[in-house]
Amino acid sequence: MGTTDNAQNKNRIWIVMGVSALSGLLTAASMPNFDVSFLGWIALVPLLIALEFAPNKSAETLAIPFGVVWSLAVHNWYPNVMGPFLGYPLIFIVGWYYAMLIGWGVALQRKLPAPFKLIALPIVWTAAEFVKYVAPIVEDWWFVWLANSQWRFPPA
């Protein structure tokens, strides 16, 4: 019986990782290169649902496929501009950064009382994007923002 539970847990982790990667693909498809901007509003939903099915696992670890797949799709020009030795590691670092943001948001969500759980991740993400926007050291960094998915819809 223990072996069956262990196999089910491994399968569940692979499913969660696959759904995380799916969220990365959907988010990438919402960006200007692919330009299916409405996906920007729902792309993280599969990842967030998957995180609920693995509550005892690190959200940051489970979000890494999302971050890396998305970063590979939207920062694929890094190696051409910065060279492969700097470009490829930066793609993975940026992907990890966004996985880390999701991890922080979910960690906060798990600590908050029920009425406030819904706003934990948006608050963390928005705070990080705001700091990225106002901090003088990062103003020239070439991160693609999730908001870029709405470039054809400025009111968003």
Image (cartoon, rainbow, N blue to C red):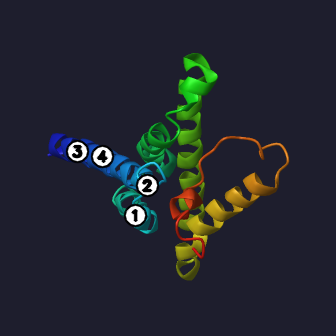
Q: Nearer the viewer, mark 3 or mark 4?
A: 4
Q: Considering only vertical position in the picture, is 40 above or below 17? A: below
**Is 122 left, or right, of 31 in this rendering?**
right
Amino acid type, mark 2? Thr
The residue tagged 1 is 39
The answer to whether residue 13 of the structure is visible from this angle is: yes
What residue would you read off at disc 2? Answer: 27
Residue at image x 59%, y 68%? 122
Q: Comparing marks 3 and 2, which lies closer to the viewer?
A: 2
Left or right, residue 150 beside residue 127: left
Where is 119 relative to 141, above or below?
Answer: below
* Marks 3 & 4, CB-CB < 8 Å contact: no
| Label 1 with label 2: CB-CB less than 8 Å | yes
Q: Does residue 112 appear in this view? A: no
Judging depth in this view, the residue of 53 and 40 nearest the camera is 40
| Snapshot quadrant of residue 121 | bottom right
